[in-house]
Image: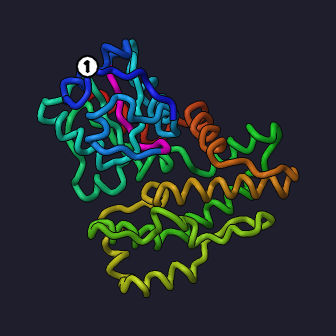
Amino acid sequence: MKKALKMEGFRRTRNGISNLFHFYNVDYVVYLEGGKNSFSKDDILESSDNYTSDSEDISFWSKIFDNNINGKKFKYKSIGSKKTLKEIADDLILGQIRNIYIAMDNEFDEILNKRLLHPNILYTHGYSYENDIWNAKTVIDVLKEITSTNVDENYINNGFNRFISDIKLGVFCDAYLFKKNLSFFERKSGILFCIDCSNLDTFPSVKKDVIEDRILLKSLKVNTVRNYAYKNKINTLKHCFGHLLADFCCRIINHYIRIKHNFNTITKDIIYRLAINRFFNEQYPTCAFVDHYKNQFSS
């Protein structure tokens, strides 16, 4: 983890956070999720060193800021925990902290009316940044970048669309349980429990029987879940658990480069960065939700 210089005079105070922009010679400090470590609010107040300076969230959000604000400089800090971000956001709303932005995953906050309202508090359009960047076109664009040749787009589109169709009920269940502070998908480990991806020679796919078994395990009524999802306009691509979606797309990419080019697998950290770059280069200016971000910055 890269660390900033220690600033002894600005430890343990909200005023210290408000004045950090002076030390970084920027206009604002931006606090984000992501990074290898998760810090509490006390950690953030205790030391300006407690953050990660290189993360996928920073790669994504820095491009969002670059596309929506001109003539300003920013220092980005990934602190891992959305809980911590929300606690810092409370101080921002109360006017106890200034000169910062906070950007976080939407998850289901929009649907549950839990978004914190302040001009300097921003949310992703989808469940997380992964939902905003990953789609079949992004997979294809990343493959073109890796292979420097044409890609079998029908093959990718058909497999990706099949995933969206097959995972749909699981996403509905996840949204339904989230309102009860529960979840359908695994969040910490075993994220791909419902994905058949053990053999790179075959296109990864949803284990529909595993989805059905978990519905029974969670004592969920499918009609109730569907009614909730349709009422709240749950969209599979937008609201799928972001890490599941991103990891699935990484599996597609590694499957494709193996069967088509006999390449070795590529780590998902590299694939994530490629996807972020390809999305902003190829899709962001004309994507369906570009106004979501423009409107947040103009509020």
In depth, the one of 170 and 186 nearer the eye is 186
Q: Which residues are magenta?
A: 28-36
Query: Residue placed farthest to the left in the image?
Result: 94
Q: Residue at x 35, y 38 (%)?
A: 103
In depth, the one of 234 and 204 nearer the eye is 204
Q: Residue at x 22, y 54 (%)?
A: 113
Answer whether residue 230 is visible to the viewer in this image. Answer: no
- Residue 196 lies in the magenta stretch: no
Indicate the quadrant containing the C terminus: top left, top right, bottom left or bottom right: top left
Residue 238, compared with residue 122, is above or below; it is: below
Answer whether residue 43 is visible to the viewer in this image. Answer: yes
Q: Position of residue 8 (x, y in %)?
A: 30, 21
Query: Residue placed farthest to the front in the image?
Result: 8
Q: Quadrant of residue 87?
A: top left
SS type, badge 1: helix
Left or right placement of residue 293 versus residue 261 in this view = left
Left or right placement of residue 272 versus residue 289 in this view = right
Q: Quadrant of residue 66?
A: top left
In depth, the one of 96 and 176 nearer the eye is 96
Left or right placement of residue 1 versus residue 202 in this view = left
Local packing at callout 1 (Cα closer than 10 Å; few below 14, some 14-19, many 20+) is few
Residue 66, compared with residue 277, is above or below; it is: above
Amino acid type at circle 1 is Gly
In depth, the one of 74 and 44 nearer the eye is 44
Q: Residue at x 38, y 69 (%)?
A: 183
Q: Which residue is mark 1?
A: 9
Q: Position of residue 174 (x, y in %)?
A: 40, 68
Q: Residue at x 46, y 28 (%)?
A: 3
| Number of marks in picture | 1
